[in-house]
Amino acid sequence: MLLLASSSPRRSELLKMAGYDFTVVPADINEGYLRGTPPIQIVELLAARKAEAVAKLHPQDIVLGADTIVVLKGRVLGKPKNEEEAKAMLKLLAGNVHQVYTGYCIINNRKYLRGHESTSVEFYPLSESEIDSYVARGESLDKAGAYAIQGRGALFIKRIDGDYYNVMGLPIGKINRILAGMKTAEDGK
Ligand SMILES: Cc1cn([C@H]2C[C@H](O)[C@@H](COP(=O)(O)OP(=O)(O)OP(=O)(O)O)O2)c(=O)[nH]c1=O
């Protein structure tokens, strides 16, 4: 059985879209961002913590954990705590190029498979009123970097280089290949 150790509706949607049969088991972990830790390590570590917390309770299952952050010029932007923080994040992102990192961790039979994917995103310059009305819609609060590429945040995007689904929270093509590889290895046993 495949368990998704994430409460993110986007990750569920992507796994469903890919045809997977799975159960959501949200992991209750401390996501406090690790000051001074490089972004790739942050997302891989948090993905592993989520997967580990669920694998402990369900050792017979395959567990997938993931974590997404936005990074602008070395500065890590997670999920904004309130509307003010969301506006400040969007002000920073406006007219600039940032990176979206999603870390993933798959635990199968006590074996860990960790990795990450990075996508580069360029925003158009944004006016203050554009930012204010976007944040007022309520789309920002549960998203890293305070925007949703799959929602009205699409209007901010000038250019993207890399996997679009990675920005949404799960590089589904890569994950599918990893899971398929595990299945082939197990079938061959
Ligand atoms: C940049 C961006 C992020 N996001 C979302 C993906 C993630 O759900 C979220 C980042 O927060 P995460 O901490 O990665 O995930 P989560 O809190 O939603 O769920 P859980 O901790 O249980 O795994 O931001 C979008 O939906 N669209 C976007 O364009």
Image: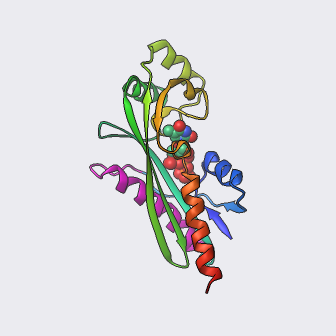
The residue at 56%/59% (across/down) is: 175
Look at the image and say whether residue 161 sits in the magenta stretch: no
Q: Quadrant of residue 186?
A: bottom right
Q: Nearer the viewer, residue 76 or 167?
A: 167
The residue at 36%/53% (across/down) is: 40
Q: Position of residue 117 (x, y in %)?
A: 45, 52
Quadrant placement of the N terminus: bottom right
The residue at 52%/46% (across/down) is: 166
Image check: 57 left or right of 84? right
Most common secondary structure along the magenta stretch: helix
Q: Position of residue 140 (x, y in %)?
A: 53, 31
Q: Position of residue 162 (x, y in %)?
A: 47, 43
Residue farthest toward the left in the current orientation of the protein:
36
Please provide the residue range marked out in magenta.
32-58
Q: Nearer the viewer, residue 157 or 135?
A: 157
Q: Quadrant of residue 180?
A: bottom right
Q: Nearer the viewer, residue 125 or 147?
A: 125
Image check: 175 left or right of 16? left
